[in-house]
Structure formats: structure tokens, C-alpha cells
Image (cartoon, rainbow, N blue to C red):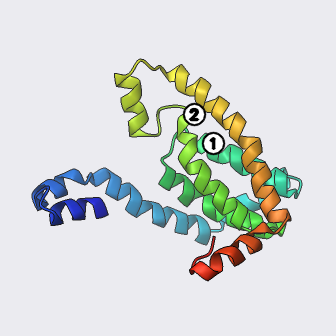
Amino acid sequence: FCAIFAMVFLKIMTPQEAIKAVEGPTLLIIASSGGVGKAIQQTGLGEWLGERFVELSFNSFIGLLIWFYVLMSVLGCFLNNNAQIVLVMPIAYSASLKAGVGFRPFMYLCMFLAHISSFNIPIARAPNLMIVNRGPYTFSDFAVFGNVLQLFLMPVTLWLLWTFEVGDLWKYFNSVCEPYGSLC
């Protein structure tokens, strides 16, 4: 939206062209996704699912991270990144409280995977569909390379999140960033 505003302000496009550039279905999805997340939280579904994930992980922090990595990878095949975060964040928050671990690793995991899980298959993202339709790529190219990417990134990501949480490195990096007016 900032880019569209800037282009109208700089007279690169007219306000009518700017209105046509914003897609109605995209705005509807973004606006309604907040309500879905709130409903998951208020109905208790997020808490119930969070408890199930803790049980499946045998109350293990690394097991819980693995389950959420898998969940986000699967959801990323069919949902856009906004929908993934809105659906999974309340569940991850409840699971972290139930397991007695910090929420920060789950928050970073959800944000990271919401953006990279689109490489598994080309369905969830419009740019991926454009690449498949116009380029020399096939559905199986995404499946093969996207899943190999996931298998490569999974241990690295989980190790980093585990190290930061167990080693309490969040506090160290916050103290480093604090003089500059921001938190990491």
C-alpha cells in the first residue's frame, strides 16, 4: 500500500489506476484472517490444539518445534503466508505456555516458515503458478527442490532456535541492540 501511495504521490499513476491495482479478494483475505485467528483463540480451539501438540511431542521443546515445523510446511502448500500465521500463532502460543517454554522460538519459526514453505509445491503462491505456467518448470520440480530445501533447512533452523532458547541468547542480543533503540 505504501508503494501504491508513493506512486500516486509522485504522479506515476492516477488514483483510479491505483484503485484498480489493489485486488479485492486479496484485501478480503487479509481483513478476514484476523477474525479467524481471534475465533481460534476465543473458542478455545487454539488452547486445545496446543495441548494436543504438547502431548504429541511428549512435552519436549525440540519435539514441539519439530511438530510446528511440519505443520507450517504442510499448511504452506495450500495457504498463503498470512493465513498460515493467523492460524498457527494462537496454537503455538498455547502450546508454548502448556509446555512451559518461551513463545519467541515458535514466533520466529512461524514467521520464517510462512515465507519459505511456499517452495514445496506451486499452488499456494501466485508467483509460483506464473513460473510454472510460463517457465520450463513442472509441478514435480517444486516438489523435489522445495522438499529438499525443507529437509536441509529443518535441522539448521531447529538447532538455531533451540540454541537461542536454551542458551538464553535472546537476552544477550537484546542487550546488544538496546543502545540503538530496538530489540532483536
Question: x, y percentage for residue 30?
Answer: 40, 59
Q: Is residue 115 left or right of residue 159?
A: left
| Earlier residue among tags 2 and 1 | 1
Residue 82 is left or right of residue 9, and the answer is: right
**Which percent across, then down, holds residue 128?**
43, 34
User: Residue 156: x and y, percent?
Assistant: 75, 45
For residue 143, above or below residue 179:
above
Helix, strand or loop for disc 2? loop
Q: Secondary structure at mark 1?
A: helix
Mark 1 — residue? 73
* Number of numbered discs overlaid on the protein picture: 2
Q: Which mark is residue 84?
A: none
Q: CB under 8 Å between callouts 2 and 1?
A: yes
Amino acid on which disc 2 is placed: Asn
> For the residue carrying disc 1, how many other residues have a C-alpha within 10 Å: few (<14), some (14-19), or many (20+)?
many
Locate the N terminus by quadrant.
bottom left
User: Please, what is the three-letter code of the amino acid marked with disc 1?
Assistant: Ser
Does residue 1 show up?
A: no
Question: Horizontally, is 146 left or right of 160 in the view?
Answer: left
- x 36%, y 24%: residue: 133
Q: Residue at x 63, y 65 (%)?
A: 90
Report the front residue among 2 and 47.
2
Q: Which residue is mark 2?
A: 120
Above or below for 118 versus 136: below
